[in-house]
Amino acid sequence: MTTILRSNGIDNSPLQIFVKAKKKINDIFTEIEDYINDTVDYMHEIENEEKIVSKGKVKKIEDYVNKVRSIREVLARDHMKVAFFGRTSNGKSSVINAMLRDKILPSGIGHTTNCFLQVEGSSAEDPYLTLEGSTEQRAVESVGQLAHALCKEKLSESQMVRVFWPKNKCLLLRDDVVFVDSPGVDVTPNLDEWIDKHCLDADVFVLVANAESTLMVTEKNFFHKVSTKLSKPNIFILNNRWDASATEPEFLDQVRRQHQERAIDFLVKELCVCTTKEAEERIFFISAKEVLQARLAEQGQTVSTPLTEGFQTRYFEFQDFERKFEECISKSAVKTKFEQHSQRGKYIANELKDILEEIYNEALKLKEEKLKLQKEITDKINYTEQQLLMVTQEMKLKIRNMVEDVEQRVSKALTE
Ligand code: GDP
């Protein structure tokens, strides 16, 4: 497998915060597992020898083996999840493709995403997809074929199709970022079901808005719902299609300021999810289409197209978004995913320590009892010895007195 690295050859992406934390917590749980396995082996060795360890305690320790194993399984599946929302055709699929540097998701007229599409990294050489409720792996050869496959299936709008893309083709997927594309929020969705099914574990939400119009009530409503179910969700707002502004440069600053103010008000005053300063770092003016085209051309996948006025600035702004997004998602995922695991790990280690301490104290008590018993027996033996000595001496004295008495009587009788 070819290893992909960032252009400078060094992986200094903020995503590494999550990647390193995941490795570290995994190592800790490997140690905890070894420690529990050693304890179980030792318990089995001493279980039958003495009555130090009860069967109940051995069972309790054995149960921790399964608990730690299931935490490690969840840990292996832990990832950073970003969900994209917005009206149909605002460019959600284009943003995802631009970030993944490849045409993975179908986009454009005729390819409206009519279900949830999740793109995640896989170790397989070739991409494939699975439909909700099935484990059957269907090969995906091209974007066109994926779009065709999705159209063929009668998918309901809240169903999830998972697209597994080879990890070695994309840095973000290699680092465990999972992308979720949604049907447009304008397709009369059951927002509650959407949020409950697909959003509760999202670390970051990206609202892809159309810079050519203002934020719509339907778009705002969705995030109002999200923020009633999740406390302070991390939301980025991308004003996409900003390349359109190039045609009207005289209004550029004014339009930008207007969008910026409205978006800040939405995040700060309406949703109350961040401060004005934080909101300023969450709003970007980009063109996903341009970035995707430029990146595909860079990789030699397509020929480069003539650049529109202001392309470089928009490209830099997209990169700025990616950097802030990576920082935000990795920090948030470390907190939401690993905080719980580390609490449970601490709890298990403490419980195990308490059980072992109990066993140790019981063993000490048993030892003391044995010593006490031994002392009592020794004392008894000493007492008996003393008694015997006393009795023997008494007897000796008595016999001597008797002998003397007899001697006296005999000599008296003889003299008489
Ligand atoms: P989605 O329905 O939100 O996923 O939108 P798509 O990504 O499918 O985009 C819909 C159409 O808008 C496609 O034809 C894209 O090529 C086009 N599009 C997406 N982003 C941009 C952009 O930044 N500028 C322009 N001019 N067109 C865009």
Image: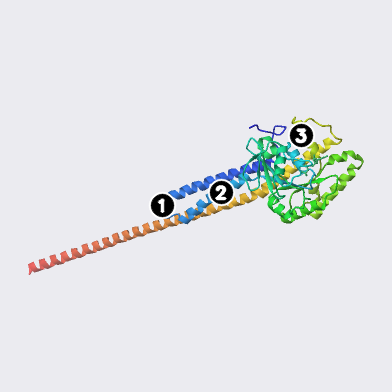
Quarter of the rendered image showing ligand 1 = top right
Which residue occupies the foreground of this view, 297 or 404?
Answer: 297
Crowding at mark 2 (Cα within 10 Å: few <14, some 14-19, many 20+)? many
- Left or right of residue 318: residue 335: left
Question: x%, y% of residue 408?
Answer: 13, 66
Residue drawn where x is 50% and y is 46% of the image: 37
Q: 10 Å neighbourhood of mark 3: few (<14), some, or many (≥20)?
A: many
Q: Secondary structure at mark 1?
A: loop
Mark 2 vs mark 3, foreground winner is 3
Residue type highlighted by circle 1: Asn
In the image, residue 273 lies at what x, y percent?
Answer: 77, 52
Give percent across and percent down for residue 98.
76, 38
Could you classify mark 1 by the number of other residues whose Cα lies within 10 Å: few (under 14), some (14-19), or many (20 or more)?
A: few
Label 2 and label 3: CA atoms lie apart by: 43 Å
Q: Secondary structure at mark 2?
A: helix
Which one is earlier in the sequence, the residue at label 1 or at label 3?
Answer: 1
User: Going by the image, does 416 lie left or right of 243?
Assistant: left
Q: Quadrant of the C terminus?
A: bottom left
Residue identifier under label 2: 68
Q: Which residue appears farthest toward the right when viewing the image?
A: 250
Residue 282 is tagged as none
In space, the residues marked 1 and 2 are separated at their CA atoms by 26 Å
Residue 14 appears in the picture as rendered:
no
In the picture, the disc for residue 48 is 1
Q: Nearer the viewer, mark 1 or mark 2?
A: 2
Residue 411 image point, x, y percent: 10, 66
